[in-house]
Amino acid sequence: MSLLWRNGQFGHFVLTRALLVAAAFAIPYIVVLIQRQGDTELTSLGSLMLASGLAGLLAGRFWGRWSDSASHHVMAAASVMSTFVMAAALAIFYWAPNWLGLEWIAALLLFASAVAHHGARVGRKTYLVDMANQDNRAQLTAVSNTVMGVVLLAGLLLGWVDSAYGAHAVLWVLIAVGILATLSALKLPDVSGDTSA
């Protein structure tokens, strides 16, 4: 774990990756928000898997090509998109909650969230590959995944926030984290084609 302190660029990447988890956490809480406002069937497990699959199929090539030239920008763009979708879901929740029960709105929110999450995954995977080299890639991946395991466990606190204050409060927290993720990603150095790490 001391690698995080010795390699400032890698530490910055791991911090950015940790903040990008907001894009992943957003999806289930948007689902909860929708379920509590209506009885739409689009929030079933099958529908979520379909949204994720379509997002990967339709946006995968776009995110992938962009990542090849500027993966840190892809992470930032995905975070902006995820944050915007959360903000849109909250706006509907506050001003037109019955709209969340409309299937086309629920589908649009879930699909856009899945596209954003897919972009965050593609961007951070590409960035790590470009930043690392054959000698340290396995070590960097292992350390990064270990830190993410801790972050995901800490995400259990969001369940407490949900039970105490509601899913809308969780989304406010995730919006703040998403903004930080965007700023952090934009400050990452460009490593496209760089294997000197």
Image (cartoon, helix red, strand yellow):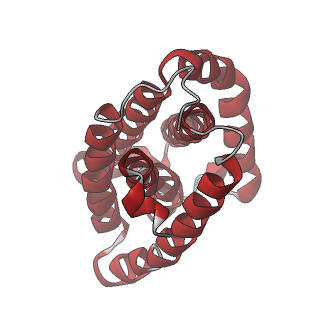
Q: Percent from the top left, x then y, of residue 152? A: 52, 70
Residue drawn 74% across the image and 41% down it: 50
Depth order, front residue of 48/70: 70
Residue drawn 26% across the image and 48% down it: 180
Residue drawn 34% across the image and 66% down it: 170
Compared across the picture, whether 127 is left or right of 53 comes to left
The correct choice, above or below, for 167 with respect to 122 in the image is below
Q: Percent from the top left, x then y, of residue 30? A: 46, 55
Q: Percent from the top left, x then y, of residue 187? A: 28, 35
Q: Is residue 4 visible?
A: yes
Residue drawn 22% across the image and 47% down it: 95
Compared across the picture, whether 187 is left or right of 1 comes to left
The correct choice, above or below, for 183 with respect to 166 in the image is above
Depth order, front residue of 51/19: 19
How many numbered markers are drawn? 0
The correct choice, above or below, for 23 with respect to 122 in the image is below
Compared across the picture, whether 25 is left or right of 138 comes to left
Compared across the picture, whether 84 is left or right of 70 comes to left
Q: Percent from the top left, x then y, of residue 166? A: 33, 73
Q: Is residue 103 visible?
A: no
The correct choice, above or below, for 138 with respect to 123 in the image is below
Q: Quadrant of residue 39?
A: bottom right
